[in-house]
Amino acid sequence: MPPEISTFAQSLGGSTVVAMRRKADALEAAGMEIVDFGIGEPDFDVPEPVKAAAIAAIQGGHGKYVDPAGLPQLRESICRFEKQCHGTDAPPENIVVTNGSYGALSMIMRAILNPGDEVLLIEPCWGPYRQMVRLCGAVPVGVPMPTVEGRFVLEKEPIADALTTRTRAIIVNTPWNPTGRVLSREELTAVAAVAERHDLWIVADEVYSELIYDGAEHVSVATISPETAARSVIASSLSKSFAMTGWRLGYCIAPPDLAAVLTKINHTTTRCAPSIVQHAAVAAFEEGLPSVEAMRDEYARRARAVARGLNQIEGVICPVPEGTFYALAQIPEQWGGSAAVADDLLTKAGVIVTPGAAYGPSCEHYIRLSFATSMDIIEEGLTRLRRALPPS
Ligand SMILES: Cc1ncc(COP(=O)(O)O)c(C=O)c1O
């Protein structure tokens, strides 16, 4: 018998999206055609200039260790991009380049949390935040948000009610997975006010910042005020905006003292983000923006089509997503729990959706559909859903 594995590590939960896909793989192997509305991964190819820059970096022999904070030219490109697209005023010293925003977020937790600290998670929320907080011996505290006209909104009162003397940080995600919301300046200002009054860090996950539709504006938490920027740390990446999920390139924007600590953690845990990909990422920021715009236009078309299709199903309410590539649809309570509904849709209709319960108890009567898939597949999936719902 090998020695024991850490009890704590063994207690970490798995991903609902991956579990649904594994179930679907078995059905697919048995001959069922699957429509996948589960996975949050762009179906577009990486922009051509990025591929060319990666090949040039390989051929130019740039596959060596680099500065753990990131290549200087990449950090400069990130600053220019953030300034131009979001108005964020951050010098290169504030940037730390990481392995995707998974890497950024887990390093941020390590940098700001002590064991026993509490972290407020705006619910519904992306599942890995909970595990990242727990990995630091800290305590995730879900804060369910109310809905107004079918949309989840961010309000100050539930946050204030969840505060204790141990609260150290609050995580906000805008554009917001799974809700498809883009948080307004007013909503973020409300969070900033609570954070300032109670001396909290704001961890802002802005990984979907470029995926905003029909006039929505992405507001970066760092632009609320200089005081807010001084207690905020942003995680972002090229995964969603540039269709580069597997390239694993992300970054943190942090006040300089925190950026220095994040750099040390990066050095200690990964040495640095992959150098070849860092060279390619410079090309993404310098030459890839027209591709982002084309992808955004197509996602916007899909967002409207998915919401329209879902709203045609009796009892289903789905606001048009303002951002991300997720539609969150409310389903009638009498249909039962979201896990059972999702299971039924998979086994009977061959459609993968993610049960809302994966994002917290307040999302129990919801299902999330990713529209990072072609219009034809979306139409086929919606036809199947119209046939299969309500569940029998
Ligand atoms: C809200 C949110 N944050 C972060 C990530 C991680 O993305 P990456 O590490 O590829 O940047 C995801 C991926 O699905 C996500 O949905």
Image: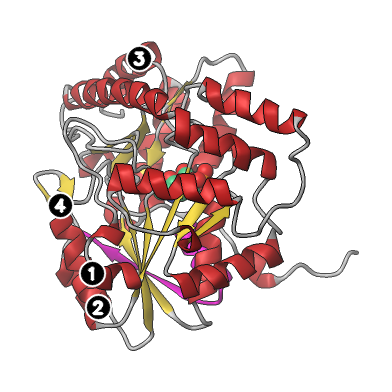
Mark 3 neighbour density, 10 Å: few (under 14) some (14–19) many (20 or more) = some
Q: Quadrant of residue 265?
A: bottom right
- Marks 3 and 4 sit apart, C-alpha to C-alpha, by 29 Å
| Residue 138 highlighted magenta (yes or no) | yes
- List the residue tagged with mark 1: 192
Q: Is residue 253 visible?
A: yes
**Dots 1 and 2: beta carbons under 8 Å?**
yes
Foreground: 10 or 265? 265
Horizontal and vertical percent for residue 116?
Answer: 49, 83
Residue 315 located left or right of residue 220: left
Residue at the image point whose x is 17% and y is 59% from the top: 187
Amino acid found under the numbered disc labelled 4: Thr
In the rendered view, tell whether residue 350 sits above or below residue 202.
Answer: above
Amino acid found under the numbered disc labelled 1: Ala
* Callout 1 secondary element: helix
Q: Is residue 337 visible?
A: no
Amino acid found under the numbered disc labelled 2: Glu
- List the residue tagged with mark 2: 196
Q: Earlier in the sequence, mark 3 or mark 4?
A: 4
Tag nearer the camera, 2 or 3:
2
Mark 1 neighbour density, 10 Å: few (under 14) some (14–19) many (20 or more) = many
Q: Earlier in the sequence, mark 4 or mark 2?
A: 4
- Marks 3 and 1 sit apart, C-alpha to C-alpha, by 39 Å
Q: Which residues are magenta?
A: 128-147
- Marks 1 and 2 sit apart, C-alpha to C-alpha, by 6 Å
- List the residue tagged with mark 3: 375
Residue at the image point whose x is 68% and y is 64% from the top: 267
- List the residue tagged with mark 4: 147
Kindly identify which numbered label has been placed on residue 283: none
Q: Quadrant of residue 153?
A: bottom left
Horizontal and vertical percent for residue 273?
Answer: 64, 50
